[in-house]
């Protein structure tokens, strides 16, 4: 299953490029969101295969926390703890329908700001090195991976990210890409248009 998620950004490049032709005013933001660290923009990949749903969310930390530096003050540490607590309860954030009976099997959060708690740096390093070449500034990303087992996957028609936009108002856009029973879909989501179907 993981290979599906890793292949998503490449598999859907033609879909997104085609969409850009009709939305010239957003073309810079949409292309940047595919592989670079851009404030206000997050990337979400999801794959539904059989009863297994996997979701990966990558976001600049500033979208979720309001800052990217190490949390030194009590206020910053509280913001990190609050964001982490919300990301550890993802059912609400992704608007999964109760009828689908999706139970969370695994949740993994990775970020330099979540120091000492289950980091897996392999992909993160690769990603950070990529955008550090374009910007000498310090960037911190949050990478969340979730795996669900759904007892009635046919009832899972899509994702609704309105609650995610509400929880993290620094997130202005999410480039969502999904693979499901009806093939591949790619869509740039905003708070007022926050649904994508499988």
Image (cartoon, grey):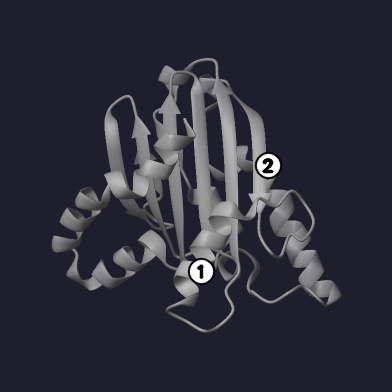
Residue at left 52%, top 50%?
Answer: 57
The image quarter containing residue 112 is bottom right
Circles 2 and 1, Cβ within 8 Å, touching? The answer is no
Residue plotted at (46% across, 20% down): 153
Q: Is residue 100 shown left or right of residue 86? A: left
Q: Position of residue 119 (x, y in %)?
A: 70, 52
Front residue of this view, candidates 103 and 47: 47
Q: Residues within 10 Å of mark 1 (few under 14, many from 20)?
A: few
Q: Quadrant of the C terminus?
A: top left
Is residue 160 in sight in this rendering? Answer: yes
Considering every residue shown, the one lying at the far top of the view is: 151
Residue for point 68% across, 42% down: 89
Disc 1 target residue: 129
Q: In percent of the image, x 42 and y 67: which residue is there? A: 36
The picture places residue 180, in percent across and down from the top left corner, at 35, 29
> From this viewpoint, is residue 22 visible?
no
Looking at this view, name the residue that lies furthest to the bottom: 136
Rendered image: mark on residue 182: none
Image side of residue 17 versus residue 40, left or right? left
Q: Nearer the viewer, residue 197 or 137?
A: 137
User: Where is residue 71 shown, x and y percent of the image?
Assistant: 77, 73
Q: Where 136 falls versus 108 (above or below)?
A: below
Instruction: Please provide percent x and percent y for residue 155.
Output: 44, 21
Describe residue 12's horizontal placement relative to residue 54 as left or right: left
> Badge 2 is on which residue?
89
Judge depth for marks 2 and 1 and give the one in front. 1
Mark 2 and mark 1: span between their CA atoms?
30 Å
Q: Secondary structure at mark 1?
A: helix
């Amino acid at each position: 299953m993981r290979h599906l998620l890793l292949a998503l950004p490449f598999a859907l490049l033609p879909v997104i490029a085609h969409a850009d032709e009709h939305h010239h005013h957003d073309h810079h933001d949409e292309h940047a969101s595919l592989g670079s660290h851009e404030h206000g923009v997050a990337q979400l990949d999801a794959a539904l295969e059989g009863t297994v749903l996997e979701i990966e969310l990558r976001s600049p930390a500033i979208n979720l926390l309001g800052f990217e530096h190490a949390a030194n003050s009590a206020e910053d540490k509280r913001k990190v703890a609050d964001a982490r607590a919300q990301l550890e309860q993802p059912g609400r954030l992704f608007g999964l329908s109760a009828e689908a009976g999706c139970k969370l099997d695994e949740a993994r959060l990775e970020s330099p700001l979540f120091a000492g708690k289950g980091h897996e740096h392999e992909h993160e390093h690769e990603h950070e090195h990529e955008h550090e070449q374009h910007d000498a500034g310090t960037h911190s990303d949050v990478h969340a991976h979730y795996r669900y087992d759904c007892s009635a996957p046919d009832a899972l028609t899509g994702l609704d990210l309105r609650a995610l936009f509400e929880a993290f108002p620094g997130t202005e856009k999410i480039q969502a890409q999904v693979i499901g029973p009806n093939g591949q879909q790619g869509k740039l989501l905003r708070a007022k248009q926050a649904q994508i179907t499988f």
